[in-house]
Amino acid sequence: MTAGKKIKGRKQHIATDTQGHLLHVKVHAANIHDTTIGGQVFEQALEKYPSLKGALFDAGYRGTTVKYVKNILGKIAEVSSRIIDSWAVLPTRWVVERSLAWFNGSRRLSKDYEISISSEENFIMITHSMILLKRLT
């Protein structure tokens, strides 16, 4: 999971599987910190997909989110860390960022056209569905 701060005043949090397919999306006001909302996003994804065993979080979620997932939800929570010595591709770290990049191709998500948060969440899900349908052809 990772947060995507693309729109002034809003943050987007998405939960994906290891392939980058969207499991859950949450859009909220930017004044809520990532560590307080991250556990709730994973919990909502867990309600949809109870077979989830754990999550790999970005470093921005360490602390409150990891404690919540481990202690309250009883699931595995790992924080991906950066390699300090040299540059290297970390495949599990970039899965969510790649999914957010796929959404940038949508004209509707490129700017803040939406008034309500729920419509933005729905357009993210529609965009992901369109991406999957294009891959079938």
Image (spheres, rainbow, N blue to C red):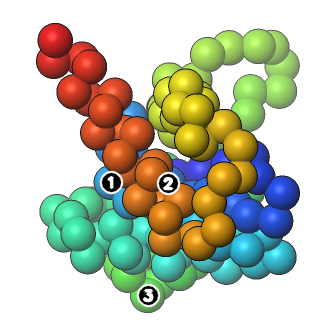
- Quadrant into which the C terminus falls: top left
**Three-letter amino acid code at disc 1?**
Leu
The percent coordinates of residue 121 (x first, y second) are 48, 61
Question: What residue sits right under mark 3 in the picture?
Answer: 72
Residue shown at 26%/29% (left/top)? 132
Secondary structure under the numbered disc 3 in the rendered image: helix
Secondary structure under the numbered disc 2 in the rendered image: strand
106 vs 26: above or below: above
Q: In the rendered structure, which disc, 2 or 1, sits on the residue that comes first in sequence?
A: 2
Residue shown at 47%/84% (left/top)? 71
Q: Residues within 10 Å of mark 1 (few under 14, many from 20)?
A: some
Mark carried by residue 23: 1
Distance between the alpha carbons at the discs numbered 2 and 3: 21 Å
**Three-letter amino acid code at disc 3?**
Ile
The tally of labels here is: 3
Question: What residue sits right under mark 2 in the picture?
Answer: 14
Q: In the rendered structure, which disc, 1 or 3, sits on the residue that comes first in sequence?
A: 1
The percent coordinates of residue 130 (x first, y second) are 31, 33
